[in-house]
Amino acid sequence: MSRTSLIVVAIVLAVLLAVPPLLKNYGVYLFSYWLVFVIATMGLNLTIGYAGQKSLGHAAFFGIGAYTVAILMKAGFSFWFGLPVAMLGCFVIGLALGAPALRVQTIYLAFATLGFNTAVWLVMRNEEWLTGGTFGINNIARPSLFGFQLSAALHYYYFVLAMAVLLGALLWKLLSSPWGKAFTALRDNPIRAESLGVNIQAYTLLSFAIGAVYAGIAGALFASLVEFIEPAPFTVGASIMMYLMVVVGGAGYFFGPLLGSAVGVLLPEWLRFAQGWYLFVFGSAVVMLMLWLPDGLLSIPDRIKARRQSREASAARNVAASKIGAAS
Amino acid sequence: MTDFFQLVFSGMATGSIYALAALGFTLLWQASGTINFAQGEFVMLPAFVMIAFATFGAPMPLAFALTCVVAVAILGWAFKRGIADPLLRFGLMPIVVATIGLSIAARNGIRAGYSAEAHPFPSLFADKLFTVAGVNLTLADIGTLVFALALVLGTQAFLARTVTGRAMQAVAQNTESATVLGINVPRMIFYTFAINAVLACAAALLVTPTYLAKFDMGESLGTKAFFAAIIGGFNNSRGALLGGIIVGVSENLAAAYISAAYKDAVALVIFMAVILFKPQGLLGKKVERKV
């Protein structure tokens, strides 16, 4: 990590630690909500941004994580038992969802995952004996950690923040390992990656499975955060929103999900002043943003750098040209 | 048994409307590589424009014609110039997200600016019932099916038989060789966008009497158009028709014989099976992997 990005990370972390205690309960709730989506979209960023797959089914894993934890907690198990089960479930199902990716690519893959999301959602809505149908599951308790109850909004926020930092660090480690480099090789040119000895089947499946685990953890945290779940937050629309967050933040940029989720979760809240129009403003803003920055918000520094380099290069050329002119 | 035939028939009528939206969708993809996630909203908006023209006293055919003009200008030309052209160079992701943003804006713009209620929409066809061999057919179903079929086949014929249509196909198959042959590529691509807009208007005209004009009517319609396009074959225009009818019929039969709650699941199962076993679609051609 370069020095500037280290400083930026430190500042962001300081803000995340210091600001929430100054906020009212709803503000703390929004911050927690945002971080939950940061975790989920970190996983999606691995799948689509780093490994170059297409996925419009991420909310399904988010939902599987949330429902697994909720159902197990209702059955009397602890959160700390539910979480690993949710992670394992998402990993296995993620491997299975990766299977179509071995056969089809690009838009076909996007629609296959979208279909998977619809199927999961139908089960959540219709299997009342398991999921409570449209009534959902309520009174989901917040977990405790080492005997410390996390039921207060602020305590739970710090717990989610710790999880986000931990998972972010893990992802960072993964991506900077040779293992992680194989994902980007897969994205940039699958055939070249294959000829260099990368097992592209295994990496494709893993990119889905690891992404799914992140979504599952986020889902588990989400269930405890809102304390009530129903099928609505796990629709195809939610998956599309997560995809949007990753691309808006900058797919393939490590900190993209942080900004992208802010756009997807916090921006609509700030736009509340527009009342009935706020989603219209939001949609239009997304279109504008894409037109302005097709590679996402985090491509701004790259753009500035590219512009400075081209300016320096042209200045250097001018100098060289004038020297030649003076010599002749 | 008569029930069965009745269900199949009305399913075909609904399916032919899905086919209209699916056809525009595949045409855009073929000609320019645009994936339009706002396809459902492209059907919803003309429905409201027609209502607006009708409230100003325009008779239905005139309202439809005016709406087509407006749609070609906005959903065709402005959409192409404003969103598709600048973003296509950057690959699939930005255009997908921009059209998602567009669909959110369109849906909520109508909700906030016009109304969140469902509005009735005059039917094109009289309320009449025919009985053929014990099977009851409504005039609306017959008319919808005939009208939609005529449009799909007309588009087909235009693409296959006219010089312009063949030029459009050439652009879809290979943009560079088309340029070399002296085809005006940007204009051909614009024609595809225009055809998509007109097909969306026609779909709106046919579907709104039963679905009612509502800001979120495009949501399910868009998904079904995607399903239809994939099932039939994403790179084949005839496939859209087949796919649309398969989706329409299967959801009707599933609602009656399996369970209304899982009505959408049957189309989904067919769709997943097609993606896994014949990803190019039932009528599509295989595309080889390129380095």
Image: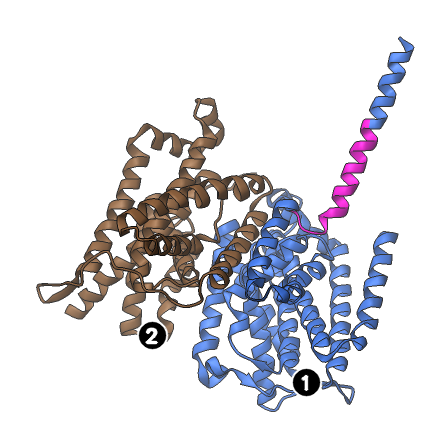
Chain colours: A blue, B brown
User: Seen in the image, is B135 located left or right of residue B258?
Assistant: left
Residue ID at (68%, 85%): A142
In the rendered view, would you say A147 is above or below A11? below
Q: Chain of mark 1?
A: A
In-image side of B117 versus B133 (left or right): right
Residue A227 versus residue A103 in the image, above or below: below
Q: Which residue is mark 1?
A: A142
Q: Is residue A69 above or below residue A91?
A: below
Side (left or right) of A15 relative to B124: right
Residue at 90%, 12% (x, y): give it: A326
Report the residue marked by disc 2. Answer: B260
| Element type at mark 1 | loop
Give the magenta part as a residue range.
A295-314
Q: Amino acid at mark 1?
A: Arg
Whether residue B264 appears in this view of the structure is yes
Give the alpha-carbon distance from disc 1 to disc 2, as whole Å: 36 Å
- Magenta span includes A312: yes
